Amino acid sequence: MPFSNDNDLDFEKRRPSVESKALRINLNPAMYGTFAEIGGGQEVARNFFRVGAASGTIAKTISAYDKNFSDDIYGEDDDGRYVTEVRLEKMLNHEMKLLEDRITRDSSPDKLFFTYANTVATIDFAKKYKGHGWMGVRFQTKPNEEYSDITLHVRFHQTNAKLQQEDLGIIGVNLIYGAFYKNNKPKNLVKYLYDHIDKESIEIDTINFKGPLFKKIDNRLMSLELVKNNMTKAVMFDSSGNNILPARILYKKNILALRGSFRPVTKVNIDMFEKSYEVFTREVDVDESKSEVIFEITLSNLMEQGEIDESDFMDRAKLLCSLGHTVMISNFKEYYKLVDYFSNYTKKQLGLTMGVNNFVEIFNEDYYKDIDGGILEAFGKMFHNKVKVYLYPISNDKGQIINSTNLKLHPRMKDFYKFFKYNNKVVDLFDFEQKYLEIFSRDILKKIKKGENDWTNKLPEGISEMIIKNKMFGYK
């Protein structure tokens, strides 16, 4: 065997330096590959050169810094952009083909080929744009094995280009090292990407694994690891279950977000979505063709029992995806943080669909004790000019419908609430299905676990069949 995966206990104790990782790869006679870096990401190959013994490992490095040269080598993209996942894929394809064409298997039967690539824009001169980048590695662990890929997207938080480049160089080494020596434990591989890096300086908001080494990996779980490890505040995946870059989905879009446990998703959840979406798309400034609906689950919701149950998480995700929805997992317990996050990507209309109980909770001052400006600062961020709440009613014990006109708040909050209500920040949803007000996910979940039968008609079409067939949520 040319190499074996590290023991994680030993790895945790000694946590090798960046130099040690690069040197270990350089000294492995089987590993052989190319480095292609566009834009600001010129530091990864340099780490391998600096430690020595690179001549047996590095077949070639290329820095296609000029856009014309980059287009000539990898092809021009239709959108004219360079820091994209599409460009990264082209780089990996092109460089691996060159490597295979120039180094024949007859002459190098034992070589393990790899290609590392990145396309990066660091902070601009005016320091208005902090920058971001895509990076990835394509590799094999046995000669002639089909290649596996790990690709990821980073966002910089440093305000110095040199520091950004240095962080990128370290993550690149950690990625290549992890690909070869941690591929049997992808969760640990993700965690070790931050070896010797301050998490506050760089964010990983998207990661994808594919290929024979990762055929049993669901990338939604890998996304969850990013949030769990505080590498990013939010991740997203589409209806096919593929991890997607939040910026690509949210940029300059109207956004309607629905937060819930979705454990499981019920007819009341879908009624909330459909009725609020109908009102949202009738707003004067909302173009339906440039709008996104996000079903959001918070990390705190996933950790109701103290730790995350991955099978429970996957059950929720699979059901929402089966209904064609985009899902977001976030670390935003408070709604104003969710709004603040969306505002990083768009200045267009934002909508929050919520039930009365959740709406009343946002007026709980205890949530805002850690903010200097308290609830006033939080609401200033949440209810800026382009944010509205679409309020779905509840029914009380007496059968009375509770909406924005008769909900109960702490007396200290009443005048505060009136300000937002009379400025049209809260919109009641009147065209709702009253029979759905009796549906609660927690009650259905209990029935599922007890093996009772009177819950299937309370879920959207096809959902109960999936739960029963796949034995989701403890169904027996």
Image: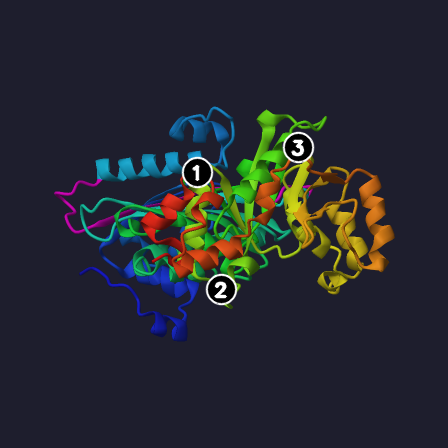
Q: How far apart are marks 3 and 2 (CA)?
A: 46 Å
Q: How far apart are marks 2 and 1 (CA)?
A: 49 Å
**Local crowd at mark 3 within 10 Å, few (<14), some, or many (≥20)?**
many
Tell me the kind of residue under disc 1. Glu
Label 1 sits on residue: 461
Q: Earlier in the sequence, mark 2 or mark 1?
A: 2
- The foreground one among 293 and 233 is 293
Classify the position of the N terminus by image quarter: bottom left
Q: Can residue 200 be seen in this view?
A: yes
Numbered tag placed on residue 214 in the rendering: none
Label 2 sits on residue: 196
- The foreground one among 64 and 470 is 470
Left or right of residue 336, residue 330 in this image? left
Please identify, in this view, whether the residue under mark 1 or under mark 3 is nearer the observer: 1
Residue 466 location, x and y as percent? 37, 45
Q: Earlier in the sequence, mark 1 or mark 3?
A: 3
Q: Residue at x 37, y 56 (%)?
A: 475
Label 3 sits on residue: 280
Magenta residues, start to end: 103-126
Please identify, in this view, whether the residue under mark 3 or under mark 2 is nearer the observer: 3
Left or right of residue 221, residue 93 in this image? left
Is 56 inside the magenta-drawn segment? no
Q: Point out the residue furthest to the right here.
A: 415
